[in-house]
Image (tube, rainbow, N blue to C red):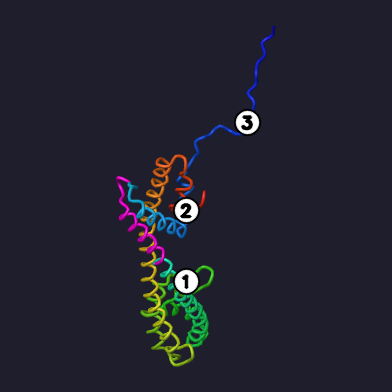
Amino acid sequence: MTDQTTTPVSTGTAPPTDAVVNPKLLTPKKDGPLAEVGRLVAEAWGKETWFALRWKTQADFATLAAEFGAAITDKRSAAAARTPQSQRLQELDDQFDEGLRILKKYINKDSGYDKARTDARLPGFGQVTRKSRGFALSEDRGERLKALRDLLLPAVAKAPFAKRDYGTAYWQTRADEYAALLGKTDGLAGKVSKSVSQKDTAKLELRKVLQAVVYALKANFPDTFEAELRSWGFRKESY
């Protein structure tokens, strides 16, 4: 009699498997969603008094999440405030370039239309040589402002064309506004840099805690952890 090998009949259901959780996928990379998940987890943690991490308290995490949200707001506010001023600085740069075009004509006429004499005088009006554009103000705004105040304005004031359309009044009003805007923009740039630094530091710590929370919930709720994650604010499988 021949032995027959029996094949198990499929029931149509796969054996239970241990679901894999990737905390990095559950933790948002973008600042806005990360701040929102941090806020929700802090709230949920505050209600679940049994939950604990030995190296981070709920109160400390709530503070961390709030600081991260505030850092994002500060960065956005500073950047938004800087934008109109940056645009105005560019407008003034364009006006300086146009003014220099006319100013060179004044200097050329005053120099008897002698190119060599004109070129020799231009550095005294704050202009530097450029390979592609001849003489012009420095492209560095700090150096440009210094050239305007220390060289161009005094030179124009002493020139016979000081009272013409592109004379002292034209350059003085624009140089004053330029100086004021540069001061504000530099301050705002510093504020943005500080906000970015604070945000990046808080972001690393925030993600570290959130990943630990995911693991802890998986360990405490092996059968229902997916529902727990959603109730704690992890509402997407990946970000």
Mark 3, residues whose alpha carbon is within 10 Å: few (<14), some, or many (≥20)?
few
**Magenta region:** 53-73
> In front of the other: label 1 or label 3?
3
Asked if the residue at tag 3 contacts the one at tag 1, i.e. Cβ–Cβ closer than 8 Å, the answer is no
Residue 211, image x and y in percent?
A: 41, 47
Tell me which amino acid carries mark 1: Thr
- SS for tag 1? strand
Q: Residue at x 47, y 71 (%)?
A: 129
Q: Residue at x 49, y 36 (%)?
A: 18
Give the Cα distance between marks 3 and 2: 42 Å
Secondary structure of the residue carrying numbered label 3: loop
Residue 136 lies in the magenta-colored region: no
Kindly report which numbered mark, 3 or 2, lies closer to the viewer in this rendering: 3
Residue 135's place in the image compared with 217, above or below, is below
Q: Which residue does the numbered mark 2 point to in the structure image?
A: 29
Residue 153 location, quadrant? bottom left
Work out whether mark 3 precedes mark 2 in sequence or the reverse, and give the earlier one: 3
Counting other residues with Cα less than 10 Å from the Cα at mark 2, is it few (<14), some (14-19), or many (20 or more)? some
Q: Secondary structure at mark 2?
A: loop
Mark number, residue 129: 1
Q: Which is more toward the observer, 21 or 14?
A: 14
Q: Position of residue 185 (x, y in %)?
A: 40, 73
For disc 3, the marked residue is 11
**What amino acid type is highlighted by mark number 2?**
Lys
* Residue lying at 42% horizontally and 88% vertically, measured from the top left: 168
Task: Point out the image quarter for the N terminus.
Answer: top right
Q: Are marks 3 and 2 in contact (CB under 8 Å)?
A: no
